[in-house]
Image (cartoon, rainbow, N blue to C red):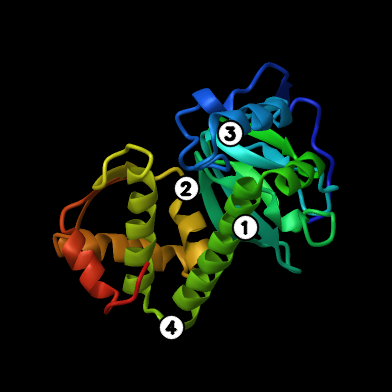
C-alpha cells in the first residue's frame, strides 16, 4: 500500500476546549493518578479533538509523526500492508487507549489506524507531551507504563501466534476484549464485535473459515451465544480453561 495523505474530509478537527479533568476516561487514559493542578496543565496541552468517520484513516503508514491520540469514543484497528498488498491487523484500540506510539522511533508512522465505527480522538502533540513529562514526574511515569503495556501486549500476540491452537487464540481474544470493555463500565459477558471475523482472523493468524468454525464450535459447546456480531459469554470459566493456565 502506498503512503497516502488523508483527504480533507477524512479526519475532521474540532477545536474546542478539551478537559481531561472532566473526562470519564481519565482513570484509564494518560492522566491516571495526576493531581488537579497537573490535570490543568494537561488540559492546556490537549488542544483539540478529531472526529474520524467509520472506515476513514486517522493516520497512514509513512505519515509524519506529530502527535499521539487518545481514543475518546469509538473503536480502531491498526494494520500494516504486506508486500502482496494484504492488510495484517496488528491491534484493536478502544476508548481510553492511545494510538500513534508506533511513530516515536523514526518520526514516521509504521501502520494505518482505521476507525471501525464513528470515533473521536483527543490530539496530544508529542513535543508538548515530552516537555510536560520533564516537569511532571507522574506523567512521565504513566506514559512509560502505557508504553510498557503496549510491549506486553505485543508479546501476548506473539504467544498467541506462536504456540496456541485456534480455540485458545479465539478464547484469549474474547476474554481480553471483555476484560478491557468491563474496565470501561460495559458488561463482562455481552459485547458487540466492532470488527469482522476476517479482521479477527488477520489479528490472530487464522483463516476466516477457521474463525467462523471456532465460533460455531464454542456455541455448540455452550461457551458462547452468537448472533452475528452480538456475542454473549455463557461459560467464562470454560473459555479460561481452554488457555491451559496462559494469561490472556
Q: Secondary structure at mark 4?
A: helix
Category of crowding for the residue at label 4, using alpha-carbon neighbours closer than 10 angstroms: few (below 14), some (14–19), many (at least 20) = few
Category of crowding for the residue at label 2, using alpha-carbon neighbours closer than 10 angstroms: few (below 14), some (14–19), many (at least 20) = some
Q: Earlier in the sequence, mark 2 or mark 1?
A: 1
Q: Quadrant of the N terminus?
A: bottom right
Q: Circle 1 sits on which residue? A: 144
Q: Earlier in the sequence, mark 4 or mark 2?
A: 4
Q: Residue at x 52, y 68 (%)?
A: 152
Q: Earlier in the sequence, mark 3 or mark 4?
A: 3
Q: Quadrant of the C terminus?
A: bottom left
Q: 142 or 112, which lies in front? A: 142
From the top left corner, tell me how far across and down residue 166 is, in percent: 37, 73
Q: Circle 4 sits on which residue? A: 163
From the top left corner, tell me how far across and down residue 96 is, in percent: 51, 40
Q: Residue at x 72, y 62 (%)?
A: 85
Q: Secondary structure at mark 1?
A: helix
Category of crowding for the residue at label 1, using alpha-carbon neighbours closer than 10 angstroms: few (below 14), some (14–19), many (at least 20) = few
Which mark's residue is nearer the viewer, 1 or 3?
1
- Residue 195's disc number: 2
Amino acid at each position: 500500500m502506498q503512503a497516502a495523505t488523508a483527504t480533507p474530509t477524512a479526519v475532521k478537527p474540532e477545536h474546542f476546549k478539551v478537559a481531561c479533568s472532566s473526562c470519564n476516561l481519565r482513570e484509564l487514559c494518560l492522566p491516571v493518578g495526576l493531581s488537579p493542578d497537573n490535570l490543568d496543565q494537561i488540559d492546556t496541552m490537549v488542544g483539540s479533538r478529531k472526529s474520524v468517520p467509520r472506515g476513514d484513516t486517522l493516520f497512514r503508514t509513512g505519515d509524519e509523526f506529530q502527535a499521539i491520540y487518545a481514543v475518546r469514543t469509538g473503536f480502531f484497528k491498526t494494520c500494516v500492508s504486506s508486500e502482496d498488498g494484504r492488510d495484517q491487523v496488528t491491534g484493536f484500540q478502544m476508548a481510553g487507549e492511545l494510538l500513534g506510539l508506533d511513530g516515536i522511533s523514526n518520526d514516521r508512522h509504521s501502520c494505518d489506524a482505521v476507525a471501525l465505527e464513528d470515533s473521536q480522538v483527543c490530539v496530544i502533540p508529542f513535543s508538548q507531551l515530552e516537555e510536560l513529562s520533564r516537569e511532571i514526574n507522574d506523567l512521565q511515569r504513566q506514559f512509560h507504563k502505557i508504553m510498557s503495556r503496549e510491549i506486553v501486549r505485543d508479546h501476548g500476540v506473539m504467544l498467541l501466534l506462536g504456540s496456541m491452537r485456534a480455540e485458545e487464540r479465539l478464547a484469549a481474544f474474547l476474554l481480553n476484549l471483555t476484560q478491557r470493555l468491563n474496565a470501561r463500565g460495559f458488561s463482562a459477558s455481552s459485547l458487540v464485535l466492532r470488527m469482522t471475523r476476517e479482521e479477527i482472523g488477520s489479528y490472530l493468524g487464522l483463516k476466516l473459515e477457521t474463525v467462523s468454525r471456532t465460533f460455531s464450535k464454542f456455541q455448540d459447546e455452550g461457551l458462547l451465544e452468537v448472533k452475528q456480531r452480538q456475542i454473549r459469554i455463557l461459560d467464562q470459566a470454560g473459555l479460561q480453561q481452554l488457555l491451559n493456565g496462559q494469561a490472556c
